[in-house]
Amino acid sequence: MRIDVVTIFPEYLAPLDLSLLGRARRDGLLDIHVHDLRTFATDRHRTVDDSPFGGGAGMVMTPQPWAAALDAVVAQGRTASMPSPHLLVPGPGGVPFTQALARRLAGEPWLAFACGRYEGIDERVYEHAAARMPVTVVSLGDYVLNGGEVAVLAMVEAIGRLLPGVVGNAESLVEESHEDGLLEYPVYTRPAVWADGDATRAVPPVLLSGDHAAIAAWRHQQRLARTAQRRPDLLPASAVTTTLSQLGLRLAVPADAEEILVLQRACWVPEGRINQAWDIPPLVETIDDVRAGLTAYRTWVGHSGGRLVVSGRARISPEDPAVWELGRLMVAPDLAGRGIGRELIAFLESQAPDTCRTAWMNTGDRSERNLRIYRKAGYRRMRTSPRYAGTVELTKRLR
Ligand code: ADE
């Protein structure tokens, strides 16, 4: 990924040379370019600000150096496959920077950050930029910093660590706060019993039990309790998963591929029978296809009794970024009829980025049961002819 940062304080970005991000830069995973805005000012004093029209406190950053800097960034970095970056402007008036946004941005090849200072950047700079590239104003939270640089450090770290190869153990990325709408469980290491002065502090016994199902259940309980106590505002979103949440829904990791393939076959054999078609993708896919699917889509899995029993995946449609494609909705046949499928659909819909206005999915045209469930969930048949013979395509307005 290429990242450009335009700032009047290039030294502020020096920490990007440290730790995991520093190593990622040296390894060529992150190609970061920091530009000094003042070098694009044309006057003798390299002025980048002036007083606001209409009066008011403070100074406003002038348009000329910004336009020149952004044009130079585009000219320097542009390639045939990467004509322009996605420009992110940190500011307290922006859309909230969340883990979901970080994940979306981690999928882009080129990001540029424009660090404002003072009272902000002349509004016409946004118009200039928007004529050339996507622009998003992003806020770290409901407080005011002196400028965008600290926000850029935070965002580049949050995005950069999601790039393949930046964090050594990819699984550590999955079991994290905010990855599925809940906060992280507490963690412990040796000693099992710690003599802390007058106090004796022991690790919760379940963690020493070796019973992985019990440990997973305990951790899930801890996550729910913590989220309720510290971030009750997060719970309505995850409450969608009431029954699902008993299944500990989480993002799939490559190690889940084998079990996903098993569940896929178990769920689609009845579909094959109903549709008299044994060549449908979920039945003929290989383990490598499933692994490739884990990269192309965000896939969630849930377990019960140590067995992978639900899964579903979604992605922004490659053809239309306003469409959220759902697929591979699977509930183990022995858990069918409990409404988990409906909840899974609602969960996948809740994961749609704000930019997606409709959800899309398809199913076999003779799969009456699926069609009934999807109809109840608000999906309607599309009138256009389906991409694959023997299927129907369904869509639903999300917002
Ligand atoms: N610049 C100033 N305040 C900010 C905030 N809260 N988030 C991002 N950038 C900022």
Image (tube, grey):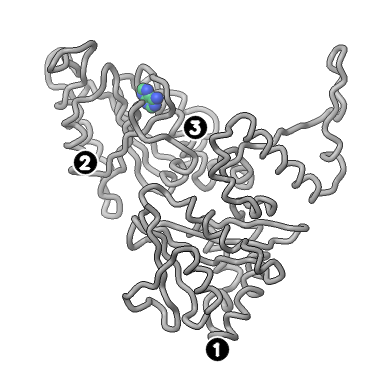
Residue 247 location (% of width, % of height):
68, 54
Q: Quadrant of residue 378?
A: bottom left
In depth, the one of 31 and 387 nearer the eye is 387
Mark 1 lies on a secondary structure that is loop
Q: CA distance from mark 3 to mark 2?
A: 31 Å
Mark 2 or 1: in front is 1
Marks 2 and 1 in Cβ contact (< 8 Å): no
Disc 1 marks which amino acid? Gln
In depth, the one of 189 and 345 nearer the eye is 345
Name the N-terminal-most of marks 1 and 3. Answer: 3
Queried on whether the Cβ of the residue with tag 2 lies below 8 angstroms from ligand 1, the answer reads no
- Residue holding disc 1: 276
Name the N-terminal-most of marks 2 and 1. Answer: 2
Mark 3 lies on a secondary structure that is helix
Residue 323 location (% of width, % of height):
37, 59
- Residue holding disc 2: 130
Disc 2 marks which amino acid? Ala
Disc 3 marks which amino acid? Gly
Queried on whether the Cβ of the residue with tag 1 lies below 8 angstroms from ligand 1, the answer reads no
Residue 339 location (% of width, % of height):
62, 63
Q: CA distance from mark 1 to mark 3?
A: 55 Å
- Residue holding disc 3: 22
Q: Is residue 286 visible?
A: yes
The residue at 76%/32% (across/down) is: 188
The residue at 38%/76% (across/down) is: 387
